[in-house]
Image: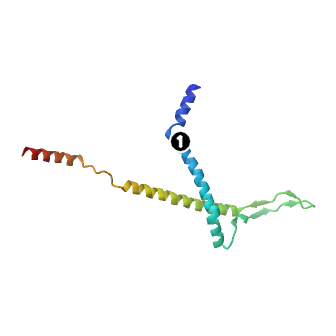
Amino acid sequence: MKNLFQEFKTFALRGNVIDLAVGVIIGAAFGKITTSLVTNIFTPILSLLTGGVDFTNRIWTLRGPELNEVGDVVREGVVISYGLFIQSMIDFVIIAFAIFLFIKAINTMQRKEEEKPGPTTKPKDIELLEEIRDTLKAKN
């Protein structure tokens, strides 16, 4: 049992697991941001552009509800909520695009960091030739 605990401790404290945990937490927070972006910004704009069409209320009724004599529902109707599916697709495209822009910005920043000139080192053969030159100069 002690060996199992030690093995688990080694696994849990390994850098990859901690990085993964941080990634999951940041991903959840980013998910909230993108959901808010879709719900509070893009959806109203899309609603304005489409003339106020609300996809979430679009359904296809396969069988209506059965009512008794009093008007109570005895058996629920069967509907396909294709509007919710369309809204989910729109949400997905917007979220995927937001993530794409975020990753693109990160990659651009990383590329700029990599393009910064570092200390230049001479190739070994040039260094050797310079040593020979300096040695010959010193002898003369």
Answer left or right for 92 relative to 113.
right
User: Which residue has dot 1 on it?
Assistant: 18
Q: Nearer the viewer, residue 131 or 123?
A: 131
Give left or right: position of 139 versus 119. left
Q: Please, which residue is most extreme toward the right here? A: 69
Number of marks: 1
Q: Provide residue 27's location: percent of width, then percent of height.
A: 57, 51
Return the residue nearer the eye: 93 or 121: 121
Q: What is the three-letter code of the residue carrying label 1? A: Ile
The quadrant of the picture occupied by the N terminus is top right
Rendered image quadrant of residue 32: bottom right
Relative to residue 118, is residue 67 drawn left or right?
right
Question: Dot 1 lies on which element?
Answer: helix
Q: Residue at x 65, y 67 (%)?
A: 44
Q: Residue furthest left?
A: 140
Return the x and y of residue 60 as percentages of the image width and height: 74, 64
Would residue 37 be found to the left or right of residue 55 on screen?
Answer: left
Compared with 46, 102 (above or below) is above
Q: Is residue 13 above or below residue 42?
A: above
Residue in the picture at 82% in, 57% down: 76
Q: Residue furthest front?
A: 138
* Picture coordinates of residue 41, whole percent (x, y): 62, 65
Q: Residue at x 40, y 54 (%)?
A: 113
10 Å crowding of disc 1: few (<14), some (14-19), many (20+): few
Coloring applied to the structure: rainbow
Identify the residue at horizontal 12%, vertical 44% (top origin).
135
Image: 67 above or below 138: below
Residue 64 image offset from top left, x and y in percent:
82, 62
Residue farthest to the top, as pictured: 2
